[in-house]
Image (spheres, rainbow, N blue to C red):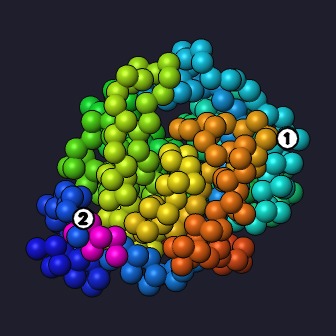
Amino acid sequence: MLMKILEKCRKRSRLSKEEIVYLLSRTDKRQTEQIFAAAREARQSEFGNKVFLYGFVYFSTYCKNDCSFCYYRKDNENPPRYRKTLEEVVETAKELRESGIHLIDLTTGDDPYYTGHPKRLAQIVKEVKEATSLPVMVSPGVLDTEGLKLIRDAGADWYALYQETHRKSLFELLRLGQSYEERMFIKAYARDLGMLIEEGLLTGVGDTLDDRAHSFGEMGRLQASQLRTMTFIPQEGAPLEGDENPPFEDELMNIAVMRLLFPDALIPASLDVEGLEGLEKRLMAGANVVTSIIPPRKGYAGVASCEHDIDDGFRTVEGIQETLGRCRMEKATAGEYEKWVADRRKCRKTWSSIKCG
C-alpha cells in the first residue's frame, strides 16, 4: 500500500485523508526511509538542492497571552523581558544580511505595545526593509485589519501567525482564552491583501494522526506558502511544564508528508527545537528552509530553546555549512529567493493541485 500511495504522490494525484493518516502512522524504519526519500525527490523536482536561510530577530518577549505551552506566556515570571530598540533591530538585521541570509523574520510575543500601536511595528518593518533590501516576515501575534495594511504598505512580504492545531477543542487547551476564528480570519485577510502566509503546527501536545491530517487540509485551504511544524518542548513555568518530552519522529514525518502534499511550498527546518544537532534530520525529511538563524551574543532569545547553540555561534550561516554539505544541499542566492517570493506573490496559486482529501 505504501508504494501505491507514494506513486500517487509522484504523479501529484490527490490523496484521501485515510491515505495521509496511513503515511503519518508508519514507524518501520524501512518504510519511513522510503517516505523521506520520496519527500527529498519531490523537493528536488521543485527546488533542486537549494535551501533558503532565515535570520531571526525576536525583538520583544512581552506577551498578553497565557498559552499553556509557551515559556513567554504573560503569567510566567521566569523569562527575561525586553523590547529591543529600533536601532538594535536594524543593526541586527544588517548583520544578518551581511552573513548571507535571505529573509529577516521580525518576531515578538503578542505585545500590545506593538499590536495596539501598529504604526510602531510598521516603522520597524520600513526601517529594516530600507536597511537590508531583503524580504521581511512579521510574526507579531494578531493584528487588526488596519494594522495588517500598515505593515504591508511598510514592506512586509510575509505574515506568520501559527494556529498550532486545527482541532478547536485542542486549540482552546493550548491558546487559553483566544479565538480560533479570529486567528484564521486575519491570516486569510492578510493573504487577500497580497501577503504570503506562514502557518504552523505544533505536535506532541495531544494531537492525533487525524488531527495532523486535518491540519494539512486547513493549511492548504488557507493557501499558506510556508508550512511549519515543530515538536512541543515542555517549558519552565508553563502549565504543560511537567509533560514528557515527546519524540521528534512525528515532526520529521509531518515535514515529509507536507512535502509530498505541497511539493512547491517552503517547509522550515527549525533550529529552535534541537539546535544544530537536529538540522540534518529535518533537511533529510524534506525541509528546504533553515530558520531561526541568530547572531551570537546579541541577547536575542529563541522560542522553544532560548539558549540552544546561540552564543556558541552554531546558529549562524557559517555554523550550518557543514550540515548542508552532508545533506548535499547548498545555500540559494539572494536573487533565487527573491524571485521565488516575487513569483509567489504575483501569481498566488489557486492551489487546485493540493493533494489532500
Quarter holding the N terminus is bottom left
**Splitting the image into 4 quarters, where does residue 239 fall?**
top left
Above or below for 340 versus 69: below
For mark 2, does the 10 Å Cα neighbourhood hold few (<14), some (14 to 19), or many (20 or more) residues?
few
Quarter holding the C terminus is bottom left
Q: Amino acid at mark 1?
A: Glu
Q: Is residue 312 left or right of residue 324?
A: right
Above or below for 296 versus 288: above
> Label 2 vs label 1: CA separation?
46 Å
Mark 1, secondary structure of its residue: helix
Query: Viewer-nearest of labels 2 and 1?
Result: 2
Q: Nearer the viewer, residue 205 or 341?
A: 205
For mark 1, does the 10 Å Cα neighbourhood hold few (<14), some (14 to 19), or many (20 or more) residues?
some
Mark 2, secondary structure of its residue: helix
Give the residue displayed 79% in from the left and 34% down from the top: 84
Q: Is residue 285 magenta?
A: no
Above or below for 268 versus 307: below
Give the residue displayed 59% in from the left and 14% down from the top: 77
Q: Is residue 252 left or right of residue 357?
A: right
Q: Return the residue at label 1.
A: 88
Q: Nearer the viewer, residue 231 or 139?
A: 231
**Splitting the image into 4 quarters, where does residue 139 fall?**
top right
Q: Return the residue at label 2.
A: 29
| Main SS class of the magenta portion in the image | helix
Lower sequence index among marks 2 and 1: 2
Q: Residue 22: x percent and y percent?
A: 16, 61
Q: Is residue 316 left or right of residue 19?
A: right
Give the residue displayed 37% in from the left and 22% down from the top: 242
Q: Is residue 119 left or right of residue 208?
A: right
Give the residue displayed 27% in from the left and 85% down from the top: 11
Q: Amino acid at mark 2?
A: Lys
What residue range appears in magenta?
A: 31-37
